[in-house]
Image (cartoon, rainbow, N blue to C red):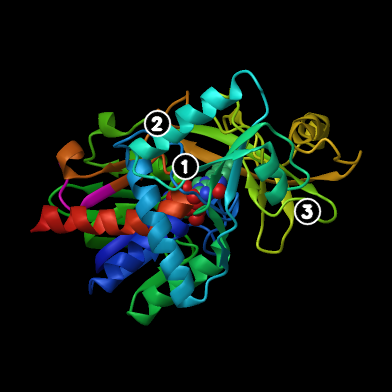
Amino acid sequence: MTETADCIVVGAGVVGLAVARAQALSGREVIVLEAAEAIGTHTSSRNSGVIHAGINYNAGSLKGRLCRRGKELLYAYCAEHGVGHRRLGKILPAFDPDTGEAKLATLKARAEANGLMDLTWLDRAAIRDLEPELDAPRALLSPSSGIVDAHELMLSLRGEIEDRGGAIALGSPVTGGHVGDSLELEIGGANPMTLRCRTLINSAGFDAQLVAAKLQGLPKDTIPPRLLAKGVWFILNGRSPFRHLIYPVGDHTDHHGIHVSIDMGGQLRFGPDLEWVETVDYRVDESRAAIFTAAARAIWPALPEGALSPGYAGIRAKTGRGRATDNDFIIQGRETHGVPGLINLYGIESPGLTSSLAIGEEVARRLATVTA
Ligand SMILES: Cc1cc2nc3c(=O)[nH]c(=O)nc-3n(C[C@H](O)[C@H](O)[C@H](O)COP(=O)(O)OP(=O)(O)OC[C@H]3O[C@@H](n4cnc5c(N)ncnc54)[C@H](O)[C@@H]3O)c2cc1C
């Protein structure tokens, strides 16, 4: 049986839901197709939950622009809809007395080139005032960084979609399709069917490339590489010694390095690390505790022995190796693949949670331009 819909979004992670909400707000009839039996079971519930300020992205990049816009939209959204969040602030310490200050200056200049003007310098005494357990000669303070309850956010977005007549179809994996003059999807699961739509947004996270590959008529050379980078966290047993997010500047080329985040319940986590993987496997290797303890002690030397427990893992949706700043979000429309009404979202790694509402806005803008 073939059904028709105005707008279909594939994937009910935070980005798919934010995109679908923007479409629903503009008056469109939206169906979100989700392979799993619940919303947000993959990357959107396996991240640091940090509202990033937009410090570490290249000027002019989508990550930089959508992170800053997304942060503003997200704080306003959370306040208006009662979604748990806290503007904790982030301290970026440099522990190396020789090279640290220069690295921080580079970071500050990059943030300012990107329009983020609120970073301030901290010396050792000012750091101690804010965080008595943190000892570093120099740091930057980012007052607009914070945390959000991603699950509450997704529930709220879902509620808005449904209030406007949209539907979230769980257990509905996209198994095939055809794009061109018309857009058609094959849906598997308990009630297999064919769905035809006017607008299709592929927001399947790290599986977006796999969904795109199933669409006959889509030029396959427009699909970027699919790389998976696993990150795990170890959790501190007991009370957090810190009140701020703490992101040391380091020498990592492909991720931030192990840092401190705090969840809405006040629990402190060290992580995530980065491991390139071939398959999605969320198990946490307990034997990494020693590596995490060493990395955590670089930030908090008083960390007691045996105080870390294995936490959880997430998978970054990457389109290339190298620095996260080198691989921008990809929001790909007709101008690249030639198919009217189709948007593919690739490489929506961090700061995708922060940027989610801005990605929704950006997709709506592009679709309005294309169909105008
Ligand atoms: C280690 C780590 C730390 C992070 N920390 C932060 C942070 O602190 N702050 C921040 O802003 N961002 C952070 N992020 C990034 C953020 O979590 C992601 O950008 C965001 O969650 C991506 O959401 P999504 O909806 O694109 O993907 P997902 O949440 O993965 O959702 C994709 C959905 O598509 C569904 N799907 C897949 N294939 C199909 C199919 N064939 N048919 C139907 N449905 C399908 C999946 O089941 C899934 O539910 C982090 C990410 C990681 C991995």
Q: Position of residue 359 (x, y in %)?
A: 34, 53
Q: In front here: 193 or 11?
A: 11
Q: Which of marks 2 and 3 is nearer the N terminus?
A: 3
Check disc 3: other Cα within 10 Å, few if <14, some if 14-19, many if 20+.
Answer: some
Residue type at tag 2: Asn
Check disc 1: other Cα within 10 Å, few if <14, some if 14-19, many if 20+.
Answer: many
How far is mark 2 from mark 3, CA to CA?
A: 33 Å
* Residue 276 visible in the snapshot: yes
**Where does the N terminus fall, quadrant-wise?**
bottom left
Residue 278 position (above or below residue 121): above
Instruction: Give the residue at mark 2.
Output: 327
Q: What element carries label 1?
A: loop
Q: In front here: 140 or 67?
A: 140
Q: Earlier in the sequence, mark 1 or mark 2?
A: 2
Check disc 2: other Cα within 10 Å, few if <14, some if 14-19, many if 20+.
Answer: many
Instruction: Give the residue at mark 1.
Output: 349
Q: Residue at x 59, y 19 (%)?
A: 99
Instruction: Give the residue at mark 3.
Output: 240
Residue 341 in magenta?
A: yes
Q: Where is residue 342 in the image (x, y as percent from the top left)?
A: 23, 50
Q: Position of residue 169 (x, y in %)?
A: 43, 68
Residue 340 in magenta?
A: yes
Q: Which residue is drawn at 19% across and 52% down?
A: 366
In this view, which residue lies farthest toward the left?
Answer: 372
On whether ligand 1 comes within 8 Å of the CB at mark 1, the answer is yes
Q: Is residue 354 left or right of residue 137?
A: left
Magenta span of residues? 338-343
Q: Where is residue 148 in the image (x, y as percent from the top left)?
A: 55, 61
Q: Which residue is drawn at 78% across and 53% down?
A: 240
